[in-house]
Image (cartoon, grey):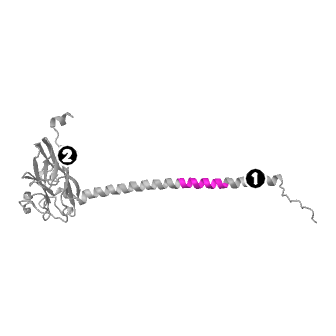
Amino acid sequence: MFGKRRNKIEQTFTPEELSRLNDKTMADAEIEHFHVKNDSIEIVKYKRRRRRLSVILGVCIAVLLLLFIISMLLTQWGDLIISVDSPLVKKGIVLSEDPEFNSQSTQLSATQLKDVTNITYAWLPTDLDDYDGGSHNGDNYVAYTFYCKNNGDVSVDYEASIEVIGAAKSADEAVRVMVYKNGEGEIYGKASYDDRTHAETDCTAFETDSTVMTSRTTEFEPDAVDKYTIVIWLEGNDPECIDDIRNGHVRMRMMFSVLEDEDEAGAQ
């Protein structure tokens, strides 16, 4: 015998309860969507910040690398740098420490000299221009011999100028620069500190506070070679050679460039 079938109990909600249930369901969905959206925004912001930091880091590394290169140029390459500018390079001018030009370049540098003290011209060897090429420094002086050649097909007019590109403790006030060109030598020094219009008694005055000298060569024929020897020292007999310049330094650059025609330069 079978008993009577029980009716399924159905749960009913009042309109107020149903309204509250719907509001809660919608609120939970909105909250979940809100969190997902916020997480996405935060991820995008994080990625942007990371990209910005990567760019900033890259720029910092590039700046540090540039400063390192400049430091190398000014400190580790030596007290004297010799360069040929681009227009003269295009005309075929090259440099070499080798008189046979088995190796050649558009930039050379003398070996740096450290821990120097003052000397005087009379103490220097008399054969400083007799070396074949390269650095031949001695006690307390820099000596460097090199060659300039016209590898082009036409004659060239050029000028070579030496400039002071760095000095500490006013050491350039007592420096002397002797320049040999094809066997002919001349000594240059900064004009008297008390009177810039007058040179020291043992030398020719710098052209300006920073320009030591300028040499001009015209009709430099193809395959022609000029020999240069540069000697640098602190002159003990200079009135500005005092204790204040101890641990100072002087750095110089010799630049070869195209010699402009005076008429053309005046017309510009």
Q: What SS does tag 1 mark?
A: helix
Q: Is residue 21 visible?
A: yes
Q: Residues within 10 Å of mark 2 (few under 14, many from 20)?
A: many
Depth check, front residue: 116 or 172: 116
- Residue at 21%, 56% in the rendered image: 251
The amino acid beneath tag 2 is Val
Residue that numbered label 2 is attached to: 89
User: Which secondary structure class fits the magenta region best?
Assistant: helix
Residue placed furthest toward the top: 267
Could you tell me which quadrant the N terminus lies in? bottom right
Depth check, front residue: 239 or 151: 151
> Is residue 167 within the magenta segment?
no
Q: Residues within 10 Å of mark 1 (few under 14, many from 20)?
A: few
Residue 61, position as x, y percentages in the image:
37, 57
The magenta stretch is 31-44
Residue that numbered label 1 is attached to: 22
